[in-house]
Amino acid sequence: IGNNFDDFYKNRLKFKLTSAQKRVIKEIRNDMGSGAQMNRLLQGDVGSGKTIVAFMSALIAIGNGFQACIMTPTEILSYQHYNKFKDICKVLNISIKVLTGSSKGLYKKELKESLIKGKIDLLIGTHTLIYDSVEFKNLGLAIIDEQHKFGVAQRSKLWHKNKFPPHVLIMTATPIPRTLA
């Protein structure tokens, strides 16, 4: 794992992770290093720390030379995530961008060119991420926030953005009954 994960965890994280967060990050780390595609559901109450687990998972992928993305159901949530992570990404020398339906033409064009060249490490956006015109050089981790707001076909489009399926982390605060799980 690259230095970004270790640097962030040891030197930049401004609070202590809960034991559950540590356990899940360890499981995700093991899944991502297993040689098989991870397809993991992260369920927790609003405010329980799913987003920091997702970000640290993205750091694992990026540290191993892959790109990561976070797909959200709304522009507001995309920008919340982007604004939460942009400063720490700058410190860690990680290129982060946001792409939504209201992204302007020239910005969108330049972003797509940079993405396919591998110059963007972490892309956060709405369902625009699944458009055919959005191509990654080497997507290693696709994170889907509030997964219940996307259809199965929409979610699976992210899985087909690479020659090899990326690891998938889907997050929800909506309880899923055990009978369905």
Image: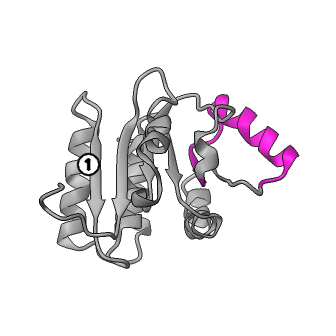
When the figure is inspected, residue 43 is found, relative to residue 169, above or below; the finding is below
**Which residues, given as a range, are shown in magenta?**
103-126
The residue nearer to you, when weighing 154 against 97, is 154
Classify residue 160 as left or right of residue 126. left
Residue 171 image point, x, y percent: 36, 59
- Tally the numbered discs: 1
Q: Residues within 10 Å of mark 1 (few under 14, many from 20)?
A: many
Depth order, front residue of 41/59 = 41
Would you say residue 125 is visible in this rendering?
A: no
In the rendering, at what x and y percent does residue 25 appear?
A: 26, 56
Q: Residue 48 in the image: state x and y as whole percent.
A: 32, 76
Q: In the rendered view, does 11 fall on the left or right side of 74?
A: left
Q: Residue furthest right?
A: 106
Residue type of the residue flagged with mark 1? Ile
Compared to residue 21, the image places residue 118 above or below, namely: above
Q: Does the magenta run of residues contain 123? A: yes
**Residue 156 showing in the rendered view:** yes
Query: Which quadrant: the N terminus?
Result: top left
Report whether 14 appears left or right of 102: left
Foreground residue among 71 and 138: 71
Vertical relation: 29 (above or below) 156 = below
Q: Residue at x 52, y 30 (%)?
A: 161
Q: Which residue is mark 1?
A: 28
Q: Quadrant of residue 61?
A: top left
For residue 122: magenta?
yes
Residue 173 in the image: x percent, y percent? Answer: 34, 70
In the image, what residue occupies the spot 53% across and 58% down? 72
Label 1: state its secondary structure: helix
Q: Quadrant of the C terminus?
A: bottom left
Q: Residue at x 40, y 70 (%)?
A: 13
Furthest residue toward top:
163
